[in-house]
């Protein structure tokens, strides 16, 4: 039986999250032998031709000069930070802990949307945000476990990714997709390329090929997300993003002998619950004008996982 509408959208989103989780698991596999910055550099370098082919489909002429340079530079810096922090966190922490922290992205988007988008947030969503932050404390258990650099990197990555999402909505359609994709891409290659001078280790051909797989999985996941939101309603498609915690549990157990403890599972449940409530609240109106959390993508932005909304703008302009 052929799936259509919301069912198709949900299935496409689930498939996209599976690709993204595989993307992250490969990062962790390579992170056992190479510095995260080196993995990000080669993944970004190998994704460059793929992204360039997509950008060539943009029919609008123009240059890389932004219309709002300040916001574009800030967005690029946040995107670079999100990518670096995400790759580092996945390399050094259990997958389930990283995802649990990254699931706070919709909560942070809701907070940032107040000063940047003029979003109105009522008591219900403030309560959900507070509930989600309590979930973060349950996962991190400050005092009961040693907080590692990876934990701080994951939190910074979530904040930077939320900033990218809100700035992108603030810019609206005033900037070409070429500008929004290329500035973080070039900045990322410069930063990670510079870091290679102190972090580089010779890579086996199979490992280099895996960085190419990372690039392909990220772009394939982004296109599946586009198809998912085209097929189904955002209120039903968006929650499927939380299925990444299931993939993380399976990959963590099978590849890295990681079993999430009770605190991580409980904290992740609290965070997911708060995020789902915010998505539900926005889908039913509430006080929201922009629905920032419902259109969030629970991904740390990087060249290998570009924002699907920007790719969709290019796709639409071809027609």
Image (cartoon, helix red, strand yellow):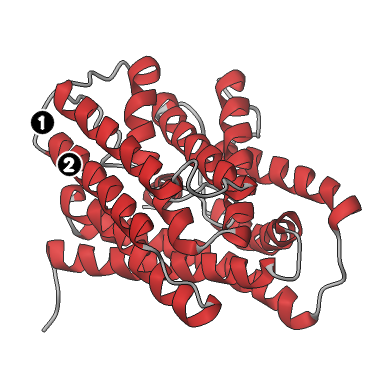
> Which badge, 2 or 1, is on the more N-terminal residue?
2
Can you say whether 290 is above or below 132 in the image?
above
Residue 185 rendering spot, x and y as whole percentages: 65, 46
Q: Residues within 10 Å of mark 1 (few under 14, many from 20)?
A: few
Q: Nearer the viewer, residue 231 or 149?
A: 149
Can you say whether 49 is above or below 297 in the image?
below
Residue 134 quadrant: top left
Residue 58 rendering spot, x and y as whole percentages: 51, 48
Residue 124 quadrant: top left
- Label 2: element kind: helix
Q: Residue shown at 11%/27% (left/top)?
A: 286
Q: Is residue 190 left or right of residue 16?
A: right
Image marks 2 and 1: residues in contact by CB distance under 8 Å:
no
Q: Residue shown at 65%/28% (left/top)?
A: 65
From the image, tell me which residue sits under label 2. Answer: 277
Q: Nearer the viewer, residue 259 or 316?
A: 259
Residue 38 quadrant: bottom right
- The quadrant in which the N terminus is found is bottom left
From the image, tell me which residue sits under label 1. Answer: 285
Q: Nearer the viewer, residue 316 or 295?
A: 295
Can you say whether 135 is above or below 258 in the image?
above
Residue 103 rendering spot, x and y as whole percentages: 37, 48
Q: Residues within 10 Å of mark 2 (few under 14, many from 20)?
A: some
In this orientation, does residue 169 appear? yes
- Label 1: element kind: loop
In this orientation, does residue 178 appear? no
Q: Is residue 206 left or right of residue 193?
A: left
């Amino acid at each position: 039986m052929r799936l259509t509408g919301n069912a198709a959208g949900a299935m496409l989103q689930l498939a996209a999250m599976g690709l993204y989780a595989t993307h992250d698991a490969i990062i962790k596999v390579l992170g056992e032998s190479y510095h995260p910055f080196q993995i990000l550099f080669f993944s970004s370098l190998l994704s460059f031709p793929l992204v360039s082919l997509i950008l060539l489909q943009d029919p609008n002429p123009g240059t890389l000069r932004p219309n709002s340079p300040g916001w574009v530079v800030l967005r690029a810096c946040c995107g670079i930070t999100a990518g670096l922090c995400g790759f580092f966190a996945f390399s050094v922490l259990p997958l389930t802990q990283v995802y649990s922290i990254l699931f706070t992205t919709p909560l942070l988007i809701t907070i940032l949307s107040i000063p940047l988008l003029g979003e109105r947030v009522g008591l219900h969503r403030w309560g959900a945000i507070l509930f989600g932050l309590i979930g973060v404390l349950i996962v991190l258990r400050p005092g009961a476990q040693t907080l590692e650099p990876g934990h701080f990197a994951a939190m910074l990555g979530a904040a930077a990714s939320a900033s990218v999402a809100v700035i992108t909505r603030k810019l609206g359609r005033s900037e070409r997709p070429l500008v929004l994709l290329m500035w973080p891409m070039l900045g990322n290659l410069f930063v990670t390329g510079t870091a290679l001078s102190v972090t580089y280790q010779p890579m086996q051909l199979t490992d280099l090929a895996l960085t190419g797989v990372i690039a392909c999985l990220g772009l394939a996941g982004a296109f599946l997300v586009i198809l998912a939101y085209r097929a189904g309603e955002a209120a039903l498609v968006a929650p499927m993003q939380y299925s990444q915690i299931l993939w993380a549990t399976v990959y963590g157990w099978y590849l890295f002998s990681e079993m999430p403890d009770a605190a991580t599972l409980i904290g992740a449940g609290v965070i997911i619950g708060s995020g789902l409530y915010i998505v539900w609240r926005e889908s039913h109106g509430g006080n929201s004008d922009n629905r920032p959390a419902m259109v969030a993508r629970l991904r740390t932005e990087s060249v290998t996982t570009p924002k699907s909304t920007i790719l969709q703008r290019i796709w639409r302009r071809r027609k």
